[in-house]
Image: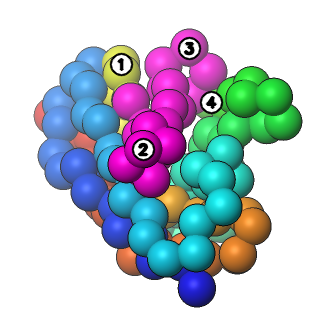
Amino acid sequence: QVQLVESGGGWVQPGGSLRLSCAASGNIISINTMRWYRQASGKQRELVARFTSGGITNYADSVKGRFTISGDNAKNTVYLQMNALKPEDTAIYYCYDAYTASWGQGTQVTVSS
């Protein structure tokens, strides 16, 4: 069993930045299996960023060049640095562990003026 706790969400104006954190506890094999998803109101949950084999990162086209996923193995924590935020980035952001199929509770990100 893995527990995932997200933090760092909030309200920000367009063009601003936020950094989300996902702290994992329990039966963690590697933070490289962890991913970030988001779900906007009335829309399906979508993959935002993940690690691939070899530590390469992969992003949704809509966030490429603006978002960066990173991790700290010693802290069992994954981060999502979000820059140049747009109103369409408004969503609940979820951390997901692909190895155990575990989800966090989500953190709300709101981008508006």
Residue at the disc numbered 4: 62
Give the residue at mark 2. 74
Query: Separation of disc 2 and disc 3 at Cα?
Result: 27 Å
The disc placed on residue 84 is 1
Q: In front: mark 1 or mark 2? A: 2
Q: Residues within 10 Å of mark 1 (few under 14, many from 20)?
A: some
**Residue 94 versus residue 55 in the image, above or below:** below
What residue did someone put label 3 on? 65
Q: Position of residue 61 (x, y in %)?
A: 70, 28
Q: Select label 2 or label 4 by which is in front.
A: 2
Give the distance between the C-alpha atoms of the residues marked 2 and 4, in whole angstroms. Answer: 30 Å
**Quick one: 15 or 25, which is closer to the camera?**
25
Q: Secondary structure at mark 3?
A: loop
Asked if residue 26 lies left or right of residue 50, the reply is left
Q: CA distance from mark 1 to mark 2?
A: 29 Å
The residue drawn where x is 48% and y is 19% is 66
Q: 2 above or below 79?
A: below
